[in-house]
Image (cartoon, helix red, strand yellow):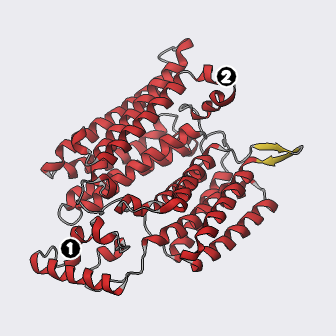
Amino acid sequence: MNRYFNREWSAIWFWGILAICCALVVITLFQFEVRASTGIVQFLSRFVLTEENNFGAWWSGLLLFVIGIHAFDGYQLYRLHQPDAARGWLLISIIMIILSADEVSSLHERANALLHLGKMLSLLPFGIILSTMLGYAIISLWSAEEHRARAGLICLGFFFFGTVAVQEYLEVKNLIDWGQLVTLRGAIEEGVELLAMMVLLAVSIGNTRGIFARKGAGAYPAFEIVGPISLPGLAIGLIAASLIGYTTSRLPDLSRGHPADWFSATVFLLASLAAASRFIRYRENIGVLKWAMTGLCLVASASFVAVSPEGTIRVASIDVNARMLLFLAVSALTCAIWALSYKNDAGVYIPAIVAIVGIALFSVFRTSLLSWFVLPTYLGFLVYYVNSTQLIKVVHPQIQSNILARLSEASALVVIDSDPTVAARDQLETPAPLGTGAYLSGSQRNSRSKTLIF
């Protein structure tokens, strides 16, 4: 498995995630004892993997999403010279994102309410679609000899997922009576599911460069799904948040997972990665404020899943909506960090602060269930929009001329698909030149034009 770890950061990333997974399985196994405790130990019951709308569900769902991000890097890495393999990785990425949404949103648990074919038969159409996508992805990866070992491990990972489906079937049919060992059944099921995720993470992590790559291997691709969004893109995201939030608020079984919460969690995760992007890609020292924003977005991502939109907290003999307090706290901390950062780009931070203050004031006077499914995602998109602006940098004219000269030299030596920017990409995106602040966005990097717009 170490062959897929390019550098020490990859090992830290993998083994750190594995350690957390093991801890969650142990908590799930001893969940009754944890709930019977007090203080911090009792708080760990919010990490039980067999329950919905808690930190455990967030971890499982977002881990699937992270694997999807690594798989998408595979698409970016191979799409020019190995298009078949690239298509395979793209399909794996889509599958993992779908599974992520299902894990947090409880989509497959609601399939019968949509199709009315029975609890198991209602899953069949979705299983056929995902199996077809997976089969095509495996065939695409197998067509490239260097990807065959990884294709085999992907099959192994999804085999483990398949055993989880079998366990759920046995549970539905009551074919096994676990009796007092019900927590063991849950720990085994969730543990096997996490094992499948770790296999897929180990296979896909090698697609990502930046801090995960060997020294000198370049910064591309590194979490390329994280990129700057335009104002029209922001508007589309807000409209999608409204539609998903409304749909979620109309669901009859809100004790299960919430699609709107998955959407806000993934947006905040992307915002977190955007804040740390220059470290991830170029190992730059991004400073305390950027790390604070990274941590805040990560906490917000988890909390908006774990804190119920209907929960209350008693404050000075008044019951206050718990999600409103969380929303106001995240808004206030975000504004504080941006206020300390505004000198770098006042034109971005000041309007964003004004917008957040307006949303926060609206949240105080508008406390419907719909609001608490929609407003967190609004906030997440706004934070992501601002955090991702750092991915577009204004390059000093001298630096730009040096980059253009290197492009010219590279195009004279190697021409790939008649695009000199592609030929010079790996040379350009090394820590040395890009440490100066230059960065080519995804659209610029893949442009057919020789003109660079920074």
Q: Which residue is drawn at 71% across and 50% down?
A: 323
- 153 versus 332 height, above or below: above
Q: In which quarter of the image is the C terminus?
A: bottom left
Q: Distance from label 2 to label 1 (Cα)?
A: 59 Å
Residue beneath label 1, please?
424
Residue 345, position as x, y percentages in the image:
55, 77
Q: What element carries label 2?
A: loop
Quadrant of the rendered image containing residue 237: bottom right
The kind of residue tagged 2 is Ser
Q: In which quarter of the image is the N terminus?
A: top left
The kind of residue tagged 1 is Ala
Residue 363, position as x, y percentages in the image:
75, 61
Cβ–Cβ under 8 Å for marks 2 and 1: no
Left or right: 206, with 170 as reference point: left
Left or right: 333, with 133 as reference point: right
Residue beneath label 2, please?
37
Residue 180, position as x, y percentages in the image:
56, 12
